[in-house]
Amino acid sequence: MRFSFPTLRYERSFLTPCAQYSRRHPTESERILWEALRGRRLGVKFRRQVVLANTIVDFFAPEARLAVEVDGAAHHGREARDRGRDAFLAGYGVRTLRVKAWDVERELEGVLAAVRAALG
């Protein structure tokens, strides 16, 4: 089953290169988490830096409709915006799990346990 979002052509043409750049230049915490998620290591396929509607999510499991966002220093002070974004995605049936970059780098097993729990 293909999972798709309504995206305007100009949004996709702008966001796709941004997502591609982010895939080629991940943060350290994104790189660590991707190594743990890739290749169906948790039983579902994850994709990284995925364009969903008018936003880019760090990791997305289409089968489970789960987005995993790594919140680093850039998210400080943007909590209200992030909540709005999560609500927007929830309107399309996508659950969002937010994890701190610090936790990914220092407590990876705890983060993976949270992802497993979110997957059900």
Image: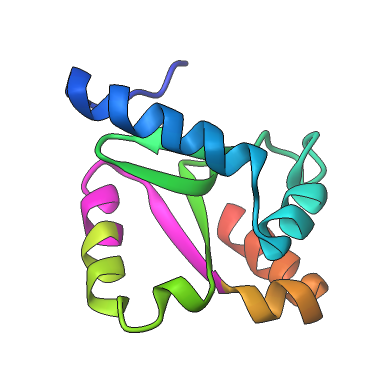
User: What x and y, as percent, mark residue 69?
Assistant: 50, 60
As drawn, is 95 to the left or to the right of 53? right
Say which of 74 and 108 sits in front: 74
Q: Quadrant of residue 17?
A: top left
- Residue drawn at point x = 81 percent, y = 52 percent: 36
> In the rendering, at what x and y percent does residue 42 appear?
77, 47
Whether residue 2 sits left or right of residue 21 in the image: it is left
110 to 47, vertically: above or below: below
Residue at the (40%, 34%) spot, across then down = 51
Residue 6 in the image: state x and y as whole percent. Answer: 21, 25
Range shown magenta:
86-99
Q: How many marks?
A: 0
Q: Is residue 32 visible?
A: yes
Residue at 50% from the left image edge and 78% from the top image edge? 73
In reply to whether residue 81 is colored magenta, the answer given is: no
Relative to 49, say whether 58 is above or below.
below
The front one of 54 and 44 is 54
Task: Answer whether residue 47 is visible to the viewer in this image.
Answer: no
Compared with residue 108, is residue 49 higher up or lower down, i.e. above or below?
above
Q: Would you say 75 lies left or right of 7 here?
A: right
Decide: is 15 above or below 67: above
